Image (cartoon, helix red, strand yellow):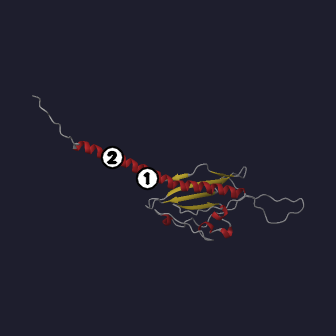
């Protein structure tokens, strides 16, 4: 006579369940880190793109030929004058507290934010740079002013400061440019200096 041995349905042991939970936890933490890194990179792209555009705008403004608005005598000549845009009066926004873990919507009205220096043709107005979309960063532009020629050295600086997580620690992106004393051309750095970009 044969004995029929029934094997009951077997469940998962506690150890197997703990291993599965541990694996799921590890995968979830890796996924969260990856998503956070992706979001931070997307936000910092704003600063890099904007500073790159400011650098191009500064070169365009420098190459624009500005001459005295006077008539020339017959066979007369007028010297070509190239000049840097003068520094902006204020950063946009004017305080880092306005971008502390939030976005800032710039004011598009005349003589505010980007067009603050429009009456004196300086800063962002001279560069013809503005942003209409809400921004994560505070932007500033400084220069040594209207100089056609100058010795080598840093003459313009475009800066973006951000506080993406709202902890009061600012990330800094900076683009510099200088007028070369030999050929009087404006050269902008090929790379943006970054300090704590994903703070």
In space, the residues marked 2 and 1 are separated at their CA atoms by 18 Å
What secondary structure is found at the residue carrying circle 1?
A: helix
Question: So how many labels did they put on this image?
Answer: 2
Residue at 57% over, 58% down: 159
Residue at 60% over, 61% down: 141
Left or right? Give the position of 44 relative to 58: left
Along the line of sight, the residue nearer the viewer: 138 or 178: 138
Give the residue furthest to the front. 1
What secondary structure is found at the residue carrying circle 2?
A: helix
Quadrant assignment, res 130 = bottom right
Using the rendered image of the protein, determine whether residue 196 is visible from the camera's viewpoint.
no
Q: Residue 34 location in percent, x, y?
A: 43, 49
Using the rendered image of the protein, determine whether residue 31 is visible from the camera's viewpoint.
yes
Give the residue furthest to the top. 1
Please identify, in this view, whether the residue under mark 2 or under mark 1 is nearer the observer: 2
Q: Which residue is mark 2?
A: 24
Quadrant assignment, res 74 = bottom right
Left or right? Give the position of 114 relative to 167: right
Residue at 68% over, 66% down: 121
The label shown at residue 106 is none
Quarter of the N terminus within the rendering = top left
Q: Residue 93 location in percent, x, y?
A: 54, 66
The label shown at residue 36 is 1
Left or right? Give the position of 199 relative to 183: left
Q: Residue 20 location in percent, x, y?
A: 29, 44
Along the line of sight, the residue nearer the viewer: 41 or 138: 41
């Amino acid at each position: 006579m044969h004995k029929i041995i029934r094997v009951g349905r077997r469940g998962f042991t506690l150890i197997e369940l703990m291993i599965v939970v541990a694996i799921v936890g590890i995968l979830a933490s890796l996924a969260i880190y990856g998503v956070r890194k992706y979001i931070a990179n997307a936000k910092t792209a704003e600063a890099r793109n904007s500073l790159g555009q400011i650098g191009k705008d500064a070169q365009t403004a420098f190459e624009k030929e500005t001459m005295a608005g006077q008539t020339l005598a017959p066979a007369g000549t007028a010297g070509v004058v190239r000049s840097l845009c003068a520094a902006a009066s204020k950063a946009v926004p004017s305080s880092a507290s306005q971008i502390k873990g939030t976005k800032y919507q710039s004011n598009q009205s005349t003589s505010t934010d980007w067009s603050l220096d429009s009456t004196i043709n300086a800063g962002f107005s001279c560069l013809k740079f503005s942003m209409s979309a809400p921004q994560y960063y505070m932007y500033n532009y400084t220069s040594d002013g209207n100089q056609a020629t100058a010795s080598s050295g840093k003459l313009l600086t475009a800066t973006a400061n951000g506080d993406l997580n709202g902890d009061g620690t600012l990330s800094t992106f900076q683009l510099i440019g200088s007028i070369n004393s030999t050929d009087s051309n404006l050269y902008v750095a090929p790379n943006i200096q970054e300090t704590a970009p994903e703070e």
